Image (cartoon, grey):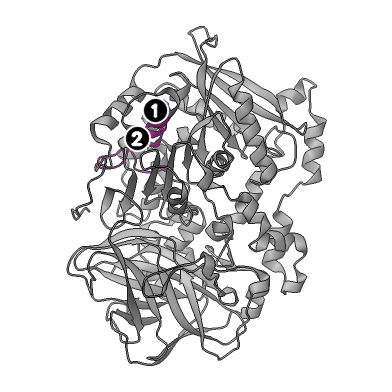
Amino acid sequence: MSIGLAVAPTASADPTGGPAAAQWLAAVDAPPAYPVVAIDWDVPITMSDGTVLKANVYRPADAAGIPVDTKMPSVLNVTPYTKLIGNVVDSVLAVPGLEDTVVDLVNSYNLAGTPFDGITEAAKVLSGGGMRVFGVNRDLVQNGYTQVVVDARGTGFSQGEWQALGPVEQRDSVEVIDWISKQSWSDGRVGMGGVSYSGINSLQAAGHQPPALKAIFPTEPGNDLLRDIVGTGAGLGVGFMPLWLSLVNGLKFVPDVQALAQGRFDQTWLQDRLRDPLTLFPALLEAMTAPTVNDLDPGTLRVAQDGEFYEERKARVDNIEVPTMLYGAWHDIFANSEPRVYNDIPLPPGEKQLIMSDAYHINFGGGFGEPGAPPRLDVLERAWYDKWLKGVDNGIDAYGPVTLYQQGNGWTTTDSFPRAGVDYQRMYLSNAPSGTAGHAAHDGSLVPAQPADFANLTVAPGLRALCSRDGAQGTAGAAVIFGSACTKDSRFNEAEGLTFTSAPVTRPTELSGPVNLHLETVLDATDGFWAVTLNDVAPDGTSTTLTNGALTASMRAVDDAQSTKSPNGDYTEPHHYLTVAARQPLVPGEVTPVDINFVPTDAVLAPGHRLRVDVYASSFPRYLPLGPMLADSQLKQQHVRLSPDRPSFVNLPLVGATAW
């Protein structure tokens, strides 16, 4: 439902793109310039250290299947999931009429209002153009581009040991870009993109400024991998990390069957795999199961805490000089990073673009191309590369520059994120019942004036978050199949949480930017874990999570040099050290303050809606404390202490006048 908020006029105040987008779509839907795609399979590319990477090269061809001689720009996608998967997706989509049939089928079944409505939400990825961005965008190839899909070092058919986005892999990307630019079919201009890992890889490569790289289109990239998903608030992302590592480590052992059958099997490939068969998996298991910090070996500590491992994997986005269109989502596993990446790129709006949807990681682009929404992702990708690799004056640089799905309202266009006019306001946690959450472990209030009440509120760890938006986000969207009763209504989960709910707003009330929750806490053990959400509560009681955050209590130390504060001195984004050296075990029974940052968000409360803060002692599978912290917590009950002299409050980024 749209409530018709006015937004500041920008280059394109229409999130659909208007007439220009109609032309972008017409270009994609038009008969292709070249009728056939020719594929050069497993082309070897030798790196400076002698390691051979394997690439599939997709080239435009004539009706006889002969690649055209014209030099053209190229698009690179580096993947750890084997280029076979991208090829399979491309092969399926290339079947005449199949894609349209699948899209029509998805759109014809509306399961809204049924227990299966999550299936419809997940399936939207099939109609939003995302699968072409993930695999091979055949439309690009048939309209004058060469697409190169490379198995990352140590994955697919490429030699070497998997680097997991490390410095050597980044150097590989730079060398591959240079290799592409010098091929006979290349005009020297290279674009780069892809989804998730490939999107991160494109940001990293752009930060190294290879001369031939001219534009990137990263979809769902992260850049603070520890805080995004590996160890948010020192809580391990167990809903994602074990399955993801299993996937990559398993796929890297899929052999080149054709080479094997022809007696060309690469022994170096196998030897490289056997040197590190389960990359990062032993460290993950030890981090989950070690009873004390002293039981963590140096290799595990390297990936379980902040430090060199993650610094090496951060893209130098402040070095990016090429036009960048970035797609993210408020409930993506990398939502913590995506708006920050956009803001840190030193390019003028238009040359950099940010799109943030309401999706999860696996249904990227869901709903794109529908009325009121942005164009399909593949349409945007084509328009972006046409502009910056071919020089086509198609107006894509006038789109946005910031296109946001404003939760509670719908698609909007604005000049910046956070939106202009943000002013921070405290809302205090009060013991007084709001009368709206009798289903919760505690029904408290969220009030604008500092309350005078005193209370010691108790919350215990539980497993209800399996049915929650936290659970869906932490599983990269897989748990969305449980349906909107879980993902868009927190009341089931709130039965084991403390809730603090405001009075209803009387006018549309916008929130835009990072949020911080300050809690005064008491633990019965030397450690504990806090998971928090910020919710929009409708008049019918539906409690929809807008954003979330988490913190292991002993990891509460804040690095002020990297934190931000509002004018009143309250944190807006506390940056926790997340290192063993900074760990501060608690004294049982002692009041201890903690500041918990939420993932940045953008939302509006409609008139009659309320704002709610939920506080939990766990949120599995989105987060699980590392083994030593979990052991120290003993899974005991935890307490929020409310008192006039030490208030607990949330610091809210409100656009315009205060709402309460």
Residue 387: assigned label: 1
Query: 429 or 126: which is nearer to us?
Result: 429
To which quarter of the image does residue 543 belong?
Answer: bottom left
Q: Is mark 1 on a helix, strand or loop?
A: helix
| x 37%, y 77%: residue | 499
Question: Badges 2 and 1: C-beta atoms under 8 Å apart?
Answer: yes
Query: According to the image, label 2 marks what residue?
Result: 397
Q: Find the residue positioned furthest to the top.
A: 64
Asked if residue 408 can be seen in this view, the reply is yes
Q: Identify which amino acid the numbered label 2 is placed on.
A: Asp
Q: Identify which amino acid the numbered label 1 is placed on.
A: Lys
Query: 11 or 302: which is nearer to us?
Result: 11
Query: From the viewer's perspective, is residue 236 above or below residue 383?
Result: below
Q: Position of residue 365 (x, y in %)?
A: 40, 42
* Region of the chain picked out in magenta, as a range: 364-387
Determine crowd level at label 2: few under 14, some 14-19, many 20+ residues with C-alpha closer than 10 A.
Answer: many
| x 63%, y 55%: residue | 310
As for residue 386 lying within the magenta part, the answer is yes
Q: On the rendered structure, is 253 left or right of 641?
A: right
Q: Where is residue 122 in the image (x, y as percent from the top left)?
A: 42, 47
Label 2 vs label 1: CA separation?
8 Å
Q: On the rendered structure, is 316 left or right of 410?
A: right
